[in-house]
Amino acid sequence: MDEVDRSRAFLKDVKRIVLKVGTAVVTRNDGRIALGRLGALCEQLKELNSLGYEVILVSSGAVGLGRQRLRYRKLVNSSFADLQKPQVELDGKACAAVGQNCLMALYDTLFSQLDVSSAQLLVTDSDFRDRDFRKQLSDTVKSLLSLKVIPIFNENDAVSTRRAPYEDSSGIFWDNDSLAALLALELKADLLVLLSDVDGLYSGPPSDPRSKIIHTYIKEKHQSEITFGDKSRVGRGGMTAKVKAAVNAAYAGIPVVITSGYAPGNLSKVLEGQRVGTLFHQDAHLWSPVKEVDARGMAVAARESSRRLQAMTSEERKRVLLDVADALEANVRLINVENEADVSAAQEAGYEKSLISRLALKPGKIKSLANSIRVLANMEDPIGHVLKRTQLAEGLVLEKTSSPLGVLLIVFESRPEALVQIASLAIRSGNGLLLKGGKEAKRSNAILHKIITGAIPDSVGGKLIGLVTSREEIPDLLKHDDVIDLVIPRGSNKLVSQVKNLTKIPVLGHADGICHVYIDKSANMDMAKRIAVDAKVDYPAACNAMETLLVHKDLKDTTEFNDLVVDLRAEGVTLYGGPRASSLLNIPQAHSFHHEYSSMACTVEFVDDVHAAIDHIHEHGSAHTDCVIAEDLEVVDAFLGQVDSAAVFHNASPRFCDGARFGLGAEVGISTSRIHARGPVGVEGLLTTRWILRGNGQVVDGDKGVIYTHKDLPIEP
């Protein structure tokens, strides 16, 4: 028996069906009733009724119908003067009350023409908290079905106590999709059918020609691959709500089919076992086992794709990046929908504001990222660049050339924009890539990965960039030092340490961003105020934001320093002090100097001089980015020459420590390591070198016949 037959075989035992009809099926685009569709549906239900099926209908549409009816009555009863006034939106509960009456009158008329009786049952979320109600509901429905009456359910929005009926997703059910799933369980249905305005569940928005319909939903495979488009034009949910309800019901033992309510006879086709719509079943993974690609397989596939990318011409690789930039801009609305869902979930989960700030894609961010990719595309091709040419002997020329590292594994937290930057750098440098983002950015990362890989030509393959979706896969990936060439963890010091302890693969570590600004007594204090405020306030969640302000002791009683403290507080910065500053400024003492706030807070401490500032930075800093504000050149030279950090600035905000601002196009991270690459890591940090030797038949033969010249040759353009 093939997959289709096996997946639909259970239908022969179906007797009791819960059918949910969405607002988009009940109404037309102009909001009026879709009489033809509704009539055809009632005819299908009549046929099923006569065949002995027990059908329970859950119907949306009351609010929409009521709104249309009330708007019409209001228009008829309005004077010309009334129409000139601002129009107030109609109360949703009133619309529900009027519309429910219209909806049931319509069903009653249609069914009566078919010699079928129907019954109305309005319920609210709070009803299901009452055990006696649930028993009585079951008994009533059982009695109606025995009399061949079709029960029609709807949420009683007219008297619902839900805080925000069209937004609140708490409680026992929160829309008619989840109500249908609840009723299927409560009334022991054999099948739940959710009628939609599309043919079923697609791998992406149905309007996208690259999206494909999913006939059998396998949770283990599809939950991380599907990209949802906008919600329904009407009603509360759309496909996201339907899938959530379907998964809940299916894994509780009720098979579910999502299919189109527009196509005539679809319900009958479902029951006949035809492969229409999308089936959800708790045993689906047994019918079509998920073809797992193990960690090693992902890395090998990325390497193979990277070699095909390297074989392309420079212009072709440039074209790939430009296509990625265009694809991101073309899908900005879809990206924002997914990102907003991640942000909302993070807020509901109670994540820290600093994480939520890093998670959110601010307005214009996608356009900015796309422009950065175009800058990267138009840079000189870094692959195969001749770095040095040497004549070893007559007719024997050695070239040192730039070459991709191979396969990179990037583990990053929170920031979905990092995925775009890293992916574009990998493409530009010809590297294969495996990405593991934080779970809080799951939807954002999934849509960005799908758009980027969709823009990569088939000749290279989307497996060039693999998205690791499970945290459990990381330890396995870290074992494969023979197929993964570099790991770059972007996140906390804890994350970097964990990765280093789990692997033999070289790790390019980006530790804490404990950045210092030291204000010397020779500083221009107007400049110092601007820099210190920018360093903390411009983007406090960034790793290059100021976390500690060191101030020369001679400035503590000056008006200029007091003004700086006032400016920081006026911006909303909470100040903590070291042992000296806390008492002098009457501020709380910081629990540690080695602390990254990543928020509108920082530590202030007084130091004796520049050498004390340097000692403090070496003892408590993270070797990320540190800044001196001074006019005394001896102080400046001492600071710039002795502070052992990846980036050291004079009279400039540490916020400039950024790949894009450095002109690198983008960055894979900011490295605080001391080997391979340090500071913002762009394309060059993702390259290694190869030696190419060109000869005409020379052999070593004990060096008897070779006269070495080791002469430097010009690098040809």
Image (spheres, helix red, strand yellow):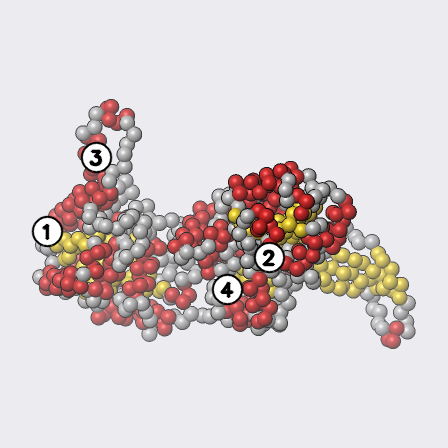
N-terminal of the pair, mark 1 or mark 4, is 1
N-terminal of the pair, mark 3 or mark 2, is 3
Residue at the disc numbered 1: 112
Residue 379 in view of the camera = no
Viewer-side label of 3, 2: 2
N-terminal of the pair, mark 1 or mark 3, is 3
Which residue type carries mark 2? Phe
Q: Residues within 10 Å of mark 4 (few under 14, many from 20)?
A: many
Which residue type carries mark 3? Tyr
Whole-angstrom CA distance, mark 3 to mark 2, is: 68 Å
Residue at the disc numbered 2: 593
- Residue 188 numbered mark, or none: none
The residue at 24%/43% (across/down) is 92
In percent of width and height, residue 605 lies at: 62, 51
In percent of width and height, residue 675 lies at: 69, 62
- Residue 468 numbered mark, or none: 4
- Residue 72 numbered mark, or none: 3
Viewer-side label of 1, 3: 3
Q: Residues within 10 Å of mark 1 (few under 14, many from 20)?
A: few
